[in-house]
Image (tube, grey):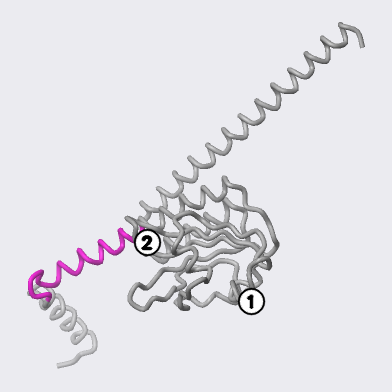
Amino acid sequence: FGSRDARLLGTLASAVGSAIHNAGLYNQAQRMIEELESILEVSKLLSSSGTLDILFQRILEHACRITDSKAGSICLFDTEEKLMRLVAVKGLNVMDRLDATWPVREGSISWQVMNNPEPIAVPDISSRRPGEGVAAKNAGIAAFVAAPLFSGGHFNGILFVDDFQPRNYPPEDVRLLAILANAASVAIDGARLNEKLSSFAFTDALTELHNRRSFEEALERETRRAIRYKHN
């Protein structure tokens, strides 16, 4: 090669390098846009009307969509019973009974997520030690990401996205899932606060007994029912 060819190759190499660099920047920009869109979508979900169960189902469907997952679930932790309770499910036939519960045993997947502030990604569940993830395997799950629902250091539950084939979830998807998990935690805290405020409206703060408003509403409710069924 002569000097002219060398200069040409250098120019081509520089152009290729710039193209690769620009492609990387473009991909980063696309991921940032996706993250912002996800945050916006979550904000809309949180501000929408509906029960907590409906909100959980919408968050789960959004999580499956952005991670291109075939299935998923949300389960909450019962601090008194030390049980996980299924509150939302998508794409699973074996674990589709809402309110299903299971204990959190030391070393189990739920226990690991409970003691880890970051999402846990498992690209191939068959590589886990024997006895681990039995329920997931029975449901046909081959890969999953489990994002803990933490709020103020308090563990609320787990957001799962699953696939029926082994796969590597990219770090960007795991990060988006963490955003949704935080949103679910906010929803849980908000629902608990509303429940507490509602109880204050009908109970005495000091004695925790039903107050006058509670008795008046109960009387009105029973009066309407008596009139409806023509009771004396």
Q: Which residue is mark 1?
A: 138
Q: Quadrant of residue 220?
A: bottom left
Amino acid on which the number 2 mark rests in the picture? Gly
Rounded to the nearest angstrom, the CA distance separating label 1 from label 2 is 33 Å
The quadrant of the picture occupied by the N terminus is top right
Between 181 and 104, the one lying in front of the other is 104
Density class for disc 1 (Cα within 10 Å; few <14, some 14-19, many ≥20) is few
For image coordinates 38% across by 64% down, the residue present is 156
Q: Residue furthest right?
A: 1
For image coordinates 37% across by 73% down, the residue present is 78
Amino acid on which the number 1 mark rests in the picture? Asn
Residue 97 x %, y %: 51, 77
Q: Is residue 178 above or below residue 96?
A: above
The circle drawn on residue 50 is 2
Q: Is residue 60 above or below residue 14?
A: below
Residue 198 x %, y %: 20, 66
Q: Quadrant of residue 39?
A: top left
Q: Which one is earlier in the sequence, the residue at label 1 or at label 2?
A: 2
Circle nearer the viewer, 1 or 2: 1
- The residue segment tinted magenta is 187-208
